[in-house]
Image: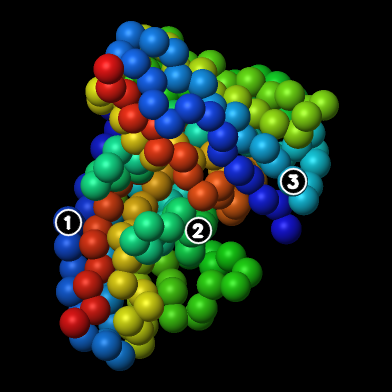
Amino acid sequence: QVQLQESGPGLVKPSQTLSLTCSVSGGSISRGSQYWTWIRQPPGKGLEWLGRVYSAGTANYNPSLNGRITISLDTSKSQFSLILTSVTAADTAIYYCARELATIGWDFWGQGALVTVSS
Amino acid sequence: SYDLTQPPSVSVSPGQTATVTCSGETLASRYTSWYQQRPGQSPVLVIYQDSKRPSGIPERFSGSVSGNTATLTISGTQSLDEADYYCQAWDSGDAVFGGGTRLTVL
């Protein structure tokens, strides 16, 4: 059973950089056909896909983030990370990491980490 | 950008059938997935590839697609099915979610 756990600061100042890490256990992060994904949910609102990194290391991102996002994989630590730059209050959300199995979807999720952008 | 439209809310009586719709252009030519999110919890995949159920998801959950509309059907709805439901599809390599439907079991 794959388990994911988000970690990182719960409070980030406007214009600064949001950084989160997702630790993966119970499975190999480098096995093929897996995409490691970040999804967020502003309080009381719906889900927004942020982007994903393939097990081989290539990534793709939601165009609406206008290049502010980087997702990277660290197979030696069985972790993947999210960096979001120039944050504003609109980036306040619960951030979920999840595993996507190709053609199936996100079958395992972390519990979510609330990040608030405020001075 | 690609949009998926869901009704904000659906109500159903216990034991009855609930239907949640999701509309989007050319949806029949894409795979639709459905996620259930109970209050305070992470989403759970309940339907993938339009109509397939992951292991552990009760048979009362089913999915279908016709034209530009995907439908999630919950037969014999139970109180524990009360949750938000999100449809999801892919557009040019990017994932898109519907706005979500709050299912209330009255």
B89 displayed left or right of B11: right
A99 up-or-down from A20: above or below? below
Mark 1: which secondary structure? loop
User: In the rendered image, which residue does mark 1 sit on?
Assistant: B8
The alpha-carbon separation of the residues under discs 2 and 1 comes to 19 Å
Give the label, 2 or 3, closer to the camera: 3
Q: Amino acid at mark 1?
A: Pro
In the rendered structure, are the residues bearing label 3 and label 1 in contact, judged by CB atoms less than 8 Å apart? no
Q: Is residue A65 visible?
A: yes
Residue lying at the far bottom of the rendered structure: B15
Q: Are marks 2 and 1 on the same chain?
A: yes
Of all chains, the one bearing label 3 is: A
Nearer to the camera, A12 or A44: A12
Where is residue B29? Give x, y as percent.
42, 45
Residue name at image x 27 percent, y 88 percent: B14
What is the x, y in percent for residue A73? 69, 24
Q: Residue at x 30, y 90 (%)?
A: B15
Secondary structure type for disc 2: strand
x and y percentages locating residue B52 in the rendered image? 54, 65
For disc 2, the marked residue is: B45
Label 1: how many residues lie within 10 Å, few (<14), some (14-19) or many (20+)? few
Q: Is residue B23 visible?
A: no
Residue A9's disc number: none
